């Protein structure tokens, strides 16, 4: 297997379009969603929506948020 330095030298020798494609492929390989995190976010968003429907969460419209500078505090 080639070393990182060897791979870098080969990559630098590629045409610009090929280097861009290589970078995109590497970045894409790192940007795969974590299924556990995705499941947790879905569960959290569904729980919040259900709490909102039950009247347990207050909602703010965009104009209200702009007036208070985006600082919305949750009453615990």
Image (cartoon, rainbow, N blue to C red):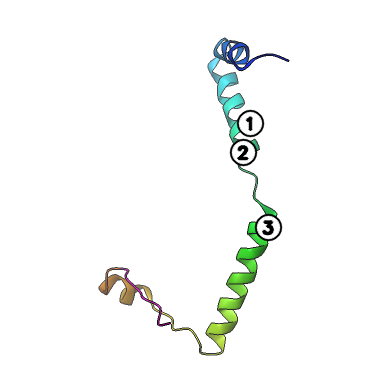
In contact (CB < 8 Å): disc 3 and disc 1: no
User: Which numbered mark, 3 or 1, is in the foreground of this view?
Assistant: 3
Q: Is residue 69 above or below residue 11?
A: below
Q: Residue at x 51, y 90 (%)?
A: 55
Magenta span has 35?
no
- Number of residue marks: 3
Asked whether, in this view, residue 49 is left or right of residue 39, the answer is left
Residue 74's label in the rendered image is none
Question: Observer-nearest residue: 22 or 47?
Answer: 47
User: Which numbered mark, 1 or 2, is in the foreground of this view?
Assistant: 2
Q: Residue at x 58, y 71 (%)?
A: 45
Q: Is residue 29 above or below residue 74?
A: above
- Circle 2 packing at 10 Å, graded few (<14), some (14-19), many (20+), is few
Residue at the bottom extreme of this rendering: 55
Q: Earlier in the sequence, mark 3 or mark 1?
A: 1
Quarter-wise, where is residue 8 in the image?
top right
Q: CA distance from mark 2 to mark 3?
A: 16 Å
Q: Residue at x 57, y 78 (%)?
A: 49
User: Which numbered mark, 2 or 3, is in the foreground of this view?
Assistant: 3
Dominant SS of magenta comes to loop
In contact (CB < 8 Å): disc 2 and disc 3: no
Quarter-wise, where is residue 30 in the image?
top right
Q: Which residue is mark 1?
A: 25
Element at badge 1? Answer: helix
Q: Which residue is mark 2?
A: 30
Q: Residue at x 32, y 70 (%)?
A: 71
- Circle 3 packing at 10 Å, graded few (<14), some (14-19), many (20+), is few
Asked whether, in this view, residue 21 is left or right of residue 61, the answer is right
Q: Which residue is mark 3?
A: 36
On the image, the x and y values in percent for residue 50 come to 60, 82
């Amino acid at each position: 297997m080639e070393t990182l330095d060897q791979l870098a030298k080969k990559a630098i020798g590629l045409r610009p379009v090929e280097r861009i494609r290589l970078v995109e492929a590497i970045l894409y390989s790192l940007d795969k969603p974590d299924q556990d995190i995705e499941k947790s976010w879905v569960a959290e968003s569904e729980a919040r929506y259900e709490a909102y429907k039950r009247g347990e969460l207050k909602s703010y419209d965009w104009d209200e948020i702009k007036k208070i500078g985006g600082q919305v505090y949750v009453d615990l």
